[in-house]
Amino acid sequence: MAASYRLAISGAISARIRKLYGVARDQGRGAEFRAAIAQGLSKLEDDPLGFGEPSFRYKHLDLLNYVVIEPPLAIEYCVDEARKIVYLKLLTLQDPPPG
């Protein structure tokens, strides 16, 4: 099935993904990170409106901002519904569980 939305990832976000993967790998969570990023990006292309929680709208840009936790990641993105584009804004690596 073809993706419903086009995913826009800037060079800075691509670099951040690589950096976060390195951190996760060093923590022994590399496989978990790879699975989460693959699943998250797939969901962003297929159903970004149903994936995260809407947090606010950029009124003049007509973009809706979303936030979602896809352990071990927190992902923030914007959706342009008219153009069917998802802009990946921020990824954050959650702290590993204690113990």
Image (cartoon, helix red, strand yellow):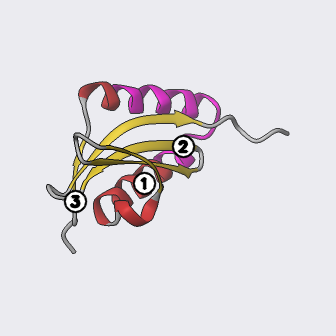
Q: Residue at x 40, y 27 (%)?
A: 16
Q: CA distance from mark 1 to mark 2?
A: 9 Å
For mark 3, give the secondary structure.
loop
Q: Residues within 10 Å of mark 2 (few under 14, many from 20)?
A: many
Residue 5 numbered mark, or none = 3
Residue 99 appears left or right of 71: right
Magenta residues, start to end: 15-34
Residue 73 numbered mark, or none = 2
For mark 2, give the secondary structure.
strand
Marks 1/3 in contact by CB < 8 Å: the verdict is no
Q: CA distance from mark 1 to mark 3?
A: 13 Å
Residue 42, percent from left and from top: 34, 59
Q: Residue furthest front?
A: 59
Q: Residue at x 24, y 47 (%)?
A: 62
Marks 1/2 in contact by CB < 8 Å: the verdict is yes
Q: Between residue 26 and residue 40, name the one nearer to us.
A: 40
Q: Nearer the viewer, mark 3 or mark 2?
A: 3
Q: Residues within 10 Å of mark 3 (few under 14, many from 20)?
A: many
Q: Quadrant of the C terminus?
A: top right
For mark 1, give the secondary structure.
helix
Q: Nearer the viewer, mark 1 or mark 3?
A: 3
Residue 35, percent from left and from top: 48, 53
Residue 40 numbered mark, or none = 1
Q: Residue at x 68, y 34 (%)?
A: 95
